[in-house]
Amino acid sequence: MKLHESPSPNARRVHIFMAEKGVEIERVAVDIRGGENLTPDYKAKNPAGRVPVLELDDGTFIGESVAICRYLEALHPQPNLLGSSAKEIALVEMWQRRAELNFMMNVAMAFRNITGFFKDRETPVKEYGEVSAVVAAEFVPMFDDQLGKTQYLAGDNFSIADITMAIAWGFAGQVKVVELPAAPNIERWLAEVNARPSFSAS
Ligand SMILES: N[C@@H](CCC(=O)N[C@@H](CS)C(=O)NCC(=O)O)C(=O)O
């Protein structure tokens, strides 16, 4: 197996997932700054032209970070990061989707459209970026309230939802395009999550 990747939030999600499970996979660097992900050769691996992509030994390519994590969880069920009981599986999925769709995606849209980082391949719309930044910030209390009630986003167990949210929060802090409101419960949770060996290793 090979993981085609670059230093980026989505690849980092998969790295952390792998580190939690103690899984090592050969890594192949993709130069997304230089547009290697947009070449016909790369698009044959992932027509969406994004990283990461997992290449299986039989020649199958799996794009989408969560799909890659699902594959790895099926191969290495422990420690469980996608839930075990019916209820837990649903709660992990619920918070994973909220973290990705409501927060991470808006942070990404704010970054791409405000900074024009990928203006060589898309038309940044500053106003769209600014609206995305506001929407990302508006969702923060939902996560903060939840983390005031539970240790991790989906309950008592660390899961993929925590990985997605912590990566997105860290990226938002790094690129500084979203004015993050005060969130004491997120800060408490983040300190715990960032202290995990999987986070410091990635
Ligand atoms: N939904 C995809 C998103 C992947 C994605 O957006 N990757 C970014 C890096 S974080 C990328 O490849 N950007 C290069 C580009 O937009 O050209 C996933 O979950 O893997």
Image (spheres, rainbow, N blue to C red):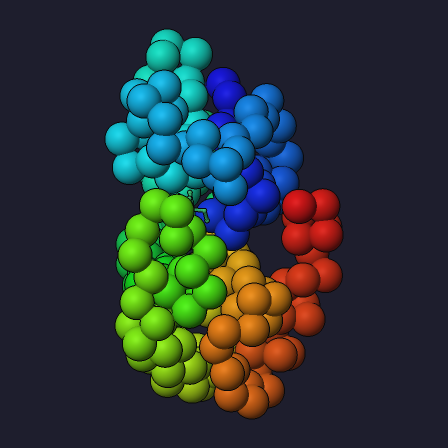
**As displayed, is residue 47 above or below residue 167?**
above
For the point 27% across and 31% down, the residue is 47
Residue 114 image point, x, y percent: 42, 69
Tell me the quarter of the picture where residue 108 sits: bottom left
Q: Is residue 156 visible?
A: no
Q: Which image quadrant for residue 96?
A: bottom left
For this orientation, the residue located farthest to the front is: 120
Residue sitting nearer the eye, 20 or 166: 166
Spot occupied by residue 59 in the image (x, y as percentages of width and height)? 36, 12
Tell me which corner region of the image, top left, top right, bottom left or bottom right, holds residue 137: bottom left
Whether residue 185 is situated above or below residue 103 in the rendered picture: below
Position of 181 compared to 71: left or right? right
Which one is nearer the viewer's eye here, 157 or 132? 132
Residue at 51% over, 52% down: 9
- Give percent across and percent down for residue 95: 36, 65
Horizontal placement of 71 versus 44: left or right?
right
